[in-house]
Amino acid sequence: MKKLTNQINPWAWVPSLYLAEGLPYVMVNVVSLIMYKRLNVPNAEIAFYTSFLYFPWVIKPIWSPVVDTLKTKRYWILIMQLILGAAFAGVAFSIPTDNFFRYTLAFFWLMAFSSATHDIAADGFYMLGLSEHQQAYFVGIRSTFYRLAMITGQGFLVIMAGKLENHFGVVNGWTITFFVITALMFLFYIYHNFVLPRPKSDIKKELKPGENVLTEFGRTFLLFIKKDKILIIIGFLLLYRFGEAQLVKLASPFLLDKRDVGGLGLSTEEVGIVYGTVGLIALTIGGILGGFLVSKHGLKYWLWWMIIAINLPNGVYIYLSVFQPENFYIINAAVAIEQFGYGFGFTAYMMYMIYISEGPYKTAHFAIATGFMALGMMLPGLFSGWLQEQLGYPKFFTWVLFSAIPGFIITIFIPLRGDFGKKKENATT
């Protein structure tokens, strides 16, 4: 029986595993903003408190060794999916209460920590449950289903919430939506309990005598910060998306806000279409094009075009906030331009994290780099909502555009090998 379990076709579990990985992330970091806006929470509070939800991803490099040394990856996946289901249910039960903001935030915190832990376990399990050939074959498939999770969360579920709002009211609409996600997450748990393989290599890591998790992480982190020009590198990781990190917290509230306070007055359903489907498709196309061009000419060749792409299209929000167009196609086109630029420009960021992680500790150093990435999203978000309320939307979006300048400046000084990312002439794939 064990032998048969290990021979489970990866198509049976890889797609569903990455749907289950992506869905909680998008609910915590994107859909929560839309829900709170529809429940009339002020922008400053939305941006400030939801920015702290990035923190579990900031500390993920520290938490990762703990997951390695306690239980198996399969165990962590299943228990986190169970906890995530409970957290979704907690949000659903809390929405109709008087203190919904405090209670739902507590459950979103639980969800964020569980989601970050699930990421660690799922990505590790992917390496253990597949052969090297299968890992290469399924890397595009796992990315595709992770993107589908984004579209499901930002698109389908937000559109569904909008339709339910029209029939049952805002509070009941979002309550029902979160009960639907609760059921979906519990179904993931039940399904994966049967279909996830049990690879022999999926065992908890045994520490040698005298070793402990914190000491090992400290040694790895010390090697990371000893890299050449490390302060420049960390500055780049924190500043490359400085403008985008502020924009992402206010984009959905701006689309939802009434026109008399400077927004576009879209419905929840319309935001699901604009930001969750059209925008995500444009983002995906931008990312694919970025990866193709970097493999053709190298990262250094495209770096400046990519930092321009991730920042300059943010100017479409200046146009939207000043002229407040009512044409739905124009709004979709503007958001698509910004998201395409974000997808294209983010390629450089991901590739640079891979570049600075080269060496014998590349997995651990890449995890540390992702922690700085999350910190770079968290810190600007803390003040972005307050700043928008002080400036108004047009001036805030103008500030977002100009706040890209520090990222441009520090990019001049980063270390980068000229041929990095370029496909070698003798490569066969």
Image: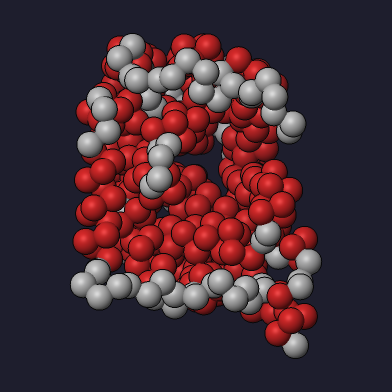
Tell which residue pokes out farthest to the front in this image.
Answer: 426
Horizontal and vertical percent position of residue 167: 66, 56
Residue 225, placed above or below residue 391 = below
**Which is more toward the observer, 33 or 375?**
375
Classify residue 265 by image quadrant: top right
Identity of the residue drawn at 35% across and 16% down? 411
Q: How is the image coloured?
A: secondary structure
Whether residue 29 is visible to the viewer of this picture, yes or no, is yes
Horizontal and vertical percent position of residue 146: 63, 49
Identity of the residue drawn at 49% across and 75% down? 203
Identity of the residue drawn at 39% across and 27% down? 241
Classify residue 178 by image quadrant: bottom right
Whether residue 189 is visible to the viewer of this picture, yes or no, is no
Residue 197, placed above or below residue 33 = below
Tell which residue pokes out farthest to the bottom in this image.
Answer: 1
Horizontal and vertical percent position of residue 204: 44, 75
Residue 369, placed above or below residue 411 = below
Classify residue 414 by image quadrant: top left
Quadrant showing the C terminus = top right
Quadrant showing the N terminus = bottom right
Identity of the residue drawn at 36% across and 55% down? 60
In the picture, measured across the screen, residue 240 lies left or right of residue 252, that is left
Horizontal and vertical percent position of residue 325: 58, 17
